[in-house]
Image: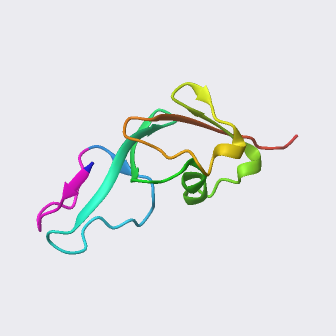
Amino acid sequence: MRVKVSPMDNRRGSLQTVFPGHSRVIDVGTVFIFVKVQINGENKEIADGLSIAGLLEQLQIRLGRVVVERNREIVSRDTYDVIFLAEGDALEIVHFVGGG
């Protein structure tokens, strides 16, 4: 999705950007490319061209303790870096936590 920003547009509807502190407006006329995805039931916008591994890194989730489901199919951990997220993808990220 291509989004052209104007001086008065510093919001993106009801969607939330995954990355804290991610600035959307740098200069009038700057074009940002985002894709809309659903992560654990919440609508999010992420940078276009982001892999599953890249998303997990941005979310600070260690690869060894997570299972990712993309569009209702479990994704093999060894393909996280070669599967790129697309507009409309639905992800479920299950993070395992140890304890007693």
Q: How is the image coloured?
A: rainbow
Work out which residue is located at the far bottom of the displayed protein and give it: 27
Measured as percent of width and height from the top left, residue 97 is found at: 76, 43
Q: Answer whether residue 9 is magenta in the image.
A: yes
Measured as percent of width and height from the top left, residue 14 is found at: 28, 43
Q: What residue is at 71 percent from the left and 42 percent from the top?
A: 77
The mark total stands at 0
Work out which residue is located at the far right of the displayed protein and give it: 100
Measured as percent of width and height from the top left, residue 66 is found at: 70, 43
Q: What residue is at 12 percent from the left and 64 percent from the top?
A: 6
Measured as percent of width and height from the top left, residue 7 is found at: 11, 68
Horizontal arrangement in the rendering, residue 7 relative to residue 31 (left or right): left
Q: What residue is at 70 percent from the left and 54 percent from the top?
A: 62
Horizontal arrangement in the rendering, residue 9 relative to residue 87 (left or right): left
Q: Is residue 49 above or below residue 99?
A: below
Q: Which region of the structure is painted magenta?
A: 2-13
Q: What residue is at 14 percent from the left and 71 percent from the top?
A: 28
Q: Answer whether residue 46 is magenta in the image.
A: no
Frontmost residue, 1 versus 56 = 1
Work out which residue is located at the far top of the displayed protein and give it: 72
Horizontal arrangement in the rendering, residue 58 relative to residue 45 (left or right): right
Quadrant of residue 20 within the rendered picture: bottom left
The rendered magenta stretch, by its main secondary structure, is classed as: loop
Frontmost residue, 74 versus 43 = 74
Quadrant of residue 87 within the rendered picture: top left
